[in-house]
Image (cartoon, rainbow, N blue to C red):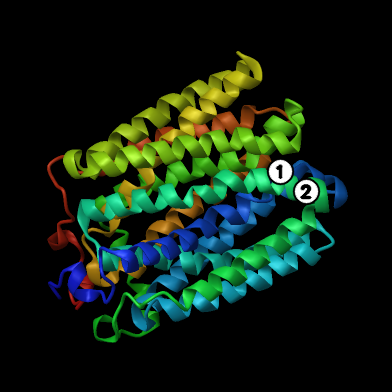
Amino acid sequence: MNNRTPSESAQVPQDGPTAIWVLGILSALMGFASISTDFYLPALPTMADALHADTGTLEWTVSGYLLGFSFGQLVWGPVGDRYGRRIPVAIGLVLFLIGSAGCALSGSADVIIGWRIVQALGASAGVVLARAMVRDLYAGDRAAQMLSTLMTVMAIAPLLGPILGGQILAIAGWRAIFWTLVAVGVLTLAALFLLPETLPAAKRNRQPLMQAFLRYGPLLSNRRLLGFSGAGGLFYGAMFAYIAGSPFAYITYYHVPPQLYGLLFAAGIVGIMISNLFNARLVMRLGGDRLLAAGTSGAALAGIALALQTWLGWGGLWSLAVLLFLFASATGFIVANSIAGAMAGFPDRAGAVSALVGALQYGSGILGSALVGAVADGTPWPMGLVMALCAIGSFASTRLLPRAASQFDLATLPEATGGIS
């Protein structure tokens, strides 16, 4: 096994103006996961009317995106380990442009679902390989700290996305939202040419891609990897239940104007930014595992309260908004720590492990958003129930993490992973 440190593998300074510019681009790439969905959320009810589709079908545009996003990560991770980070990201951005344009030109909800899958296949390249780039540059709790910093910066996209989406909807209609995503993709593709390669040719994994894909199996037998992936993945299931269900809960059930929905959604993003800032400050002192356990505990309690509120209707709109804010605020202590913890023991397979963790996370997102769509009854109750169940599962997953260990025990991995160099 190669015992190099992250700084030895990267060609990018870890401090100074160049590093800030690189981290800015990485934030933009990671933001594609959220902006691709958050931007058009205020338009979902309008799209349902315009396309003569029901609520459940439009919520499948979220699930279809997650399907493409989950599968795409499994492909791009090993590709990035073998060929470097920049070229696969560029190809992914081109796919994102094609998928976004296809959504803008679609005439039915079913066609939009198909183009959303294409859009997601492209967007997933930037997200999974941006996380791998962070692992190229940093390790351990320092990687968790940098991921929290990146997530704070990239939270600007979902913070402004629903607000801008609502305004574009009011001025130019829902199709203009997808044309705006095309423009964002073009600008990001241009910025990519200024991003240095973080994985030099000498450090790339040269095994055949098919062999790399087959080696996902042994990774899944690692208890600690499953613990981190389950904690982050099931929490994603809850968050995408929130993303799919909140437009109808706020706009349809509580009659919030689409333009104001963005402000309510933005409140949760502010909570995410604040918790990420706290996580970045605390993780080097308290450790990512401890903060992850605290975050999943808080999410489980907030989820149970949400299930009760949406069932009984206690407090109406503002009670729902406060509980959703508290739930979303747990993100800063869960996502970065679960990703960094999962990747900690595999510096030479950062792309593949990032892809596997991301696929499990967004695969759970498919389940969460699809369940909300499948059992939609015109009330917020299905959203609250799914969020509660996923949050409890996220907390339970942390029980798989050994209390005394701070790193993966590579000796516990099956022999199939032992030849990595």
**Residue 289: quadrant of the picture:** top left
Picture layout, residue 64 above or below residue 238? below
Which amino acid type is shown beneath numbered disc 2?
Answer: Leu
Q: Which mark is residue 169?
A: 2
Local secondary structure at mark 2: helix
Looking at the image, which residue is at 44% across and 68% down? 74
Residue at the disc numbered 1: 42
Judge left or right: residue 303 versus residue 60: left
Q: How many marks can you see?
A: 2
Q: Position of residue 263 (x, y in %)?
A: 63, 35
Which amino acid type is shown beneath numbered disc 1?
Answer: Pro
For the residue carrying disc 2, how many other residues have a C-alpha within 10 Å: few (<14), some (14-19), or many (20+)?
many
Q: Between label 1 and label 2, give the one nearer the viewer.
A: 2
Figure quadrant of the C terminus: bottom left
Depth check, front residue: 330 or 285: 285
Picture layout, residue 126 above or below residue 289? below
Residue 183 seen in the figure: yes
- Sequence-wise, which precedes: disc 1 or disc 2? 1
Q: Position of residue 396 (x, y in %)?
A: 34, 36
Judge left or right: residue 167 versus residue 337: right
Local secondary structure at mark 1: helix
Query: Is the C-beta separation of discs 1 and 2 under 8 Å?
Result: yes
